[in-house]
Amino acid sequence: MEVREWLKRDRFKEPLLVSCLVRVLFQPSISPQCDDGGVQSIPLHQRPDLLETCADLVNSEWQRSRGARVHSLQKSCQEFPVVLLLLQGSRNGNGGDETLLGHVRLSRVVSHRGSLFVESVVISKAQRGKGYGRTIMQEAERYARAKGFSRLCLTTHDKQHFYAHLGYVLSTPVQNAGIMASFVPMEVLGRFSRHTGTNDNLGEVLGGPPPPPRLLPSPSPPSLPTPPALPPPPTASSPPSCLPPPPLLPAQLLVQTLKETPYRDAKGVPIFWMHKDI
Ligand SMILES: CC(C)(COP(=O)(O)OP(=O)(O)OC[C@H]1O[C@@H](n2cnc3c(N)ncnc32)[C@H](O)[C@@H]1OP(=O)(O)O)[C@@H](O)C(=O)NCCC(=O)NCCS
């Protein structure tokens, strides 16, 4: 008899327990992943004991109240957004030497089914320059691929050379669904997106603004719920994030290079858009 059947028929009558066990036993295992140096990545929602340590790590780079940070990190879930942790060493017990090396968040992208948005990449200050930034990005790619995604998108204020070194190319704006995707279906977000359709040929920005904002249907279809207000756009004091798309400078600066960008965040700080096909 198959294990799945055995679990259902003979041992466990409680449906919730059965469903949990089936999920654990039969879900494709994509984490944690270990390399030879004892470094592994794992979704934060599988290690809630690391919530506060993770909040401190992210706050060491982008200041915010600890409560607010923990609250935001608690949104990590299997359905996105997901927070991936980079860990080294072994877990607790006597002599446990586990260290949190880094953090990255992955969210869905509105109207781009194959893309994920990478945010808040951070390696702890003491561990920078040792290759862990590259490792956490590789882990993000591995996680995304295993979930069926084929592109990672991101914005950065000043790490465009780091990302270019890892194979990212300059790109055009997309709309980060962030936590919205956890309570509004992606199809509904897509309908209200400011970017119409998908642009599978992003590449370097050769000039010209992103597509004009799409007008809301009028009157709204009665079957569609009105989405809640979107989260605010990125600012210089927060990790780059992307709702709504940033305003552009005047026409003479519309070429994006690794040195110059026409894009600005909500505070007017230059921001680079990049992506990588994985
Ligand atoms: C950006 C950051 C994640 C890089 O992590 P890191 O562990 O220091 O980087 P790594 O040691 O893995 O570097 C990997 C490669 O990128 C290169 N690199 C690192 N930082 C770079 C930079 N700013 N510009 C260009 N190349 C860079 C390294 O030389 C290395 O090259 P190599 O593998 O060919 O030797 C880290 O510096 C950090 O957390 N910074 C603060 C938070 C931040 O700004 N995050 C980005 C938000 S968009």
Image (spheres, rainbow, N blue to C red):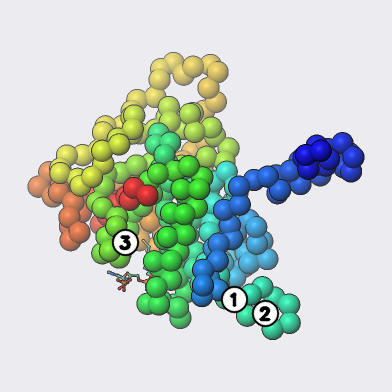
Image side of residue 133 versus residue 273, left or right: right
Residue matched to label 1:
89
Q: In this view, does 115 lie to the left or right of 34?
A: left
- Picture quadrant where residue 190 is located: top left
Helix, strand or loop for disc 1: loop
Rendering coords of residue 62 (x, y %): 44, 66
Q: Which amino acid does label 1 sit on?
A: Gly
Contact between marks 2 and 1 (CB within 8 A): the answer is yes
Asked if residue 50 is positioned above or below residue 199 in the image, the reply reads below
Which residue is labeled 3 in the image? 166
Which of the two residues, 18 or 178, is positioned nearer the viewer here? Answer: 18
Q: At 53% from the left edge and 59% from the top edge, which residue is drawn?
A: 84
- Residue displayed at 44% across by 43% down: 149
Q: Where is residue 213 in the image (x, y as percent from the top left)?
A: 31, 32
Residue located farthest toward the left when viewing the structure as drawn: 252
- Mark 2 or mark 1: name the one nearer the start of the chain: 1
Q: Which of 95 and 101 is in front in this view?
A: 95
**Which residue is tagged 2?**
96
